[in-house]
Image: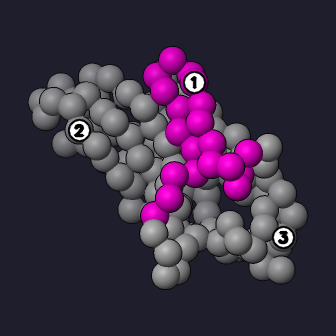
Amino acid sequence: QVQLVESGGGLVQAGGSLRLSCAASGSIFRLNAVGWYRQALGKQRELVADITSGGSTNYAESVKGRFTISRDNAKNTVTLQMNSLKPEDTAVYYCYADITSGFLGRGDYWGQGTQVTVSS
């Protein structure tokens, strides 16, 4: 079994910073691409940022220059540093991982979501 557990959400004023973390646990043979998605109230889930096993990153245009994604392959963790937050960043943020499991083969996994609220 594989699990993703997120932490670090909360309430922050516009212009502030938050750091989201996601830890993958279980029978993990290989952590492939990992990333963060978000879903604001009444909107579709959208990609925020992702990072490949080789370290290549991809960001949504709306967060470029403000957010930074990183990963620690030894610890099976992914982090999203969010700076200069705006009210429009308010959403539930979900960790995503493409994982090759020792027992289950390769599959997509999601965290439970963490709320980020940015006040104006």
Question: Residue 57, image x and y in percent?
Answer: 60, 31
Q: Say whether disc 3 or disc 2 marks the residue closer to the N-terminus.
A: 3
Residue located at (80% from left, 53% from top): 83
Magenta residues? 45-64
Instruction: Point out which mark residue 56 bears.
Output: 1
Q: Is the C-beta separation of discs 1 and 2 under 8 Å? A: no
Q: How far separated are the C-alphas under marks 3 and 1?
A: 29 Å
Secondary structure type for disc 3: loop
Q: Quadrant of the N terminus?
A: top left
Q: Is the C-beta separation of discs 3 and 1 under 8 Å? A: no
Closest to the camera, between mark 3 and mark 1, is 1
Q: Amino acid at mark 1?
A: Ser
Question: Residue 35, image x and y in percent?
Answer: 49, 42
User: Magenta stretch: residue 76 in it?
Assistant: no
Q: Amino acid at mark 2?
A: Gly
Q: How many marks?
A: 3
Closest to the camera, between mark 1 and mark 2, is 1
Secondary structure type for disc 2: strand
